[in-house]
Amino acid sequence: MSIVDDLRNLILDGHYTPGDRLGEVELAESLGVSRTPVREALRRLQSEGLVEIVANRGARVVEYPAEDLETVFELRARIEGLAARQAAATASAEEAERLHEVAVAVKEHAERDELDLVYRLNAEFHQGLVRLGGSTVLAQSISSLIHSPVLLRTYSSFDAEAMRRSVNHHIEVAAAVRAGDPDWAEAVMRAHLFSARASLLGPRKPRKQT
């Protein structure tokens, strides 16, 4: 495992929490390496959105207000729900079968607790679904959300039940696409993302009455 993987896992596992300073000297000592690979790892994690590097102030773990996370999941549910609907209406049998294969692979790696592979295959599944929908606008809209650090944090927050539910949603979405059922595909995709939101953010607070 690389230094960037080690540091990413420390952040996602909660060893370093949002807002924590990430000193190069301290990290180098704790990881048993020189400062150079630590500096490179911090730059890589900055590109992933997990770390913020400020001139003359160093690096820290990025903070995301709960309101922003709510917005990310709301956007994804709307956009990817529509993408799933369009994919079910237009995908060929061969394309639907490939989507199913990726969904099964996600489940298999999740059962082996191979989170990095789960993350990559999950992104492939969601990107593939959007691509099957055939809309450039949808693809551009969802790209940054699929790769956002919110996704990494979501998976790290899953317990065993939430992970099973998530990977089974993938398989059910693929089944809906294979069946050519847009309503089914959209409903499951929206449920999938709202379930992920609950795993990351917990119970939703009741809205204030006006």
Image: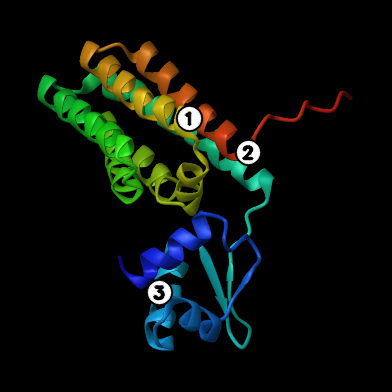
> Quick one: quadrant of the C terminus?
top right
- Disc 2 and disc 3 in contact, CB within 8 angstroms: no
Residue 39 seen: yes
Three-letter residue code for mark 2? Leu
Secondary element at image label 1: helix
- Callout 3 secondary element: helix
Q: Position of residue 171 (x, y in %)?
A: 29, 23
Q: Which residue is mark 3?
A: 41
Residue 188 image offset from top left, x and y in percent? 42, 19
Relative to 86, does residue 148 appear above or below in the rendering?
Answer: below
- Please state which amino acid type lies under the numbered disc 3: Ala
Residue placed most toward the observer, 47 or 168: 168
> Which of the labelled discs sits on residue 36, or is there none?
none
Q: Compare marks 2 and 3 and give the one earlier in the sequence.
A: 3
What amino acid does circle 1 point to?
Answer: Ala
Q: Quadrant of residue 44?
A: bottom left
Asked where in the image residue 165 lies, by quadrant, the reply is: top left
Q: Which residue is mark 2?
A: 201
Label 3 crowd (10 A; few <14 / some 14-19 / many >=20): many
Judge left or right: residue 14 versus residue 185: right
Whole-percent x and y of residue 105? 22, 35
Looking at this rendering, what residue extends furthest in the right direction?
A: 210
Label 1 sits on residue: 162
* Residue 134 shows in this picture: no
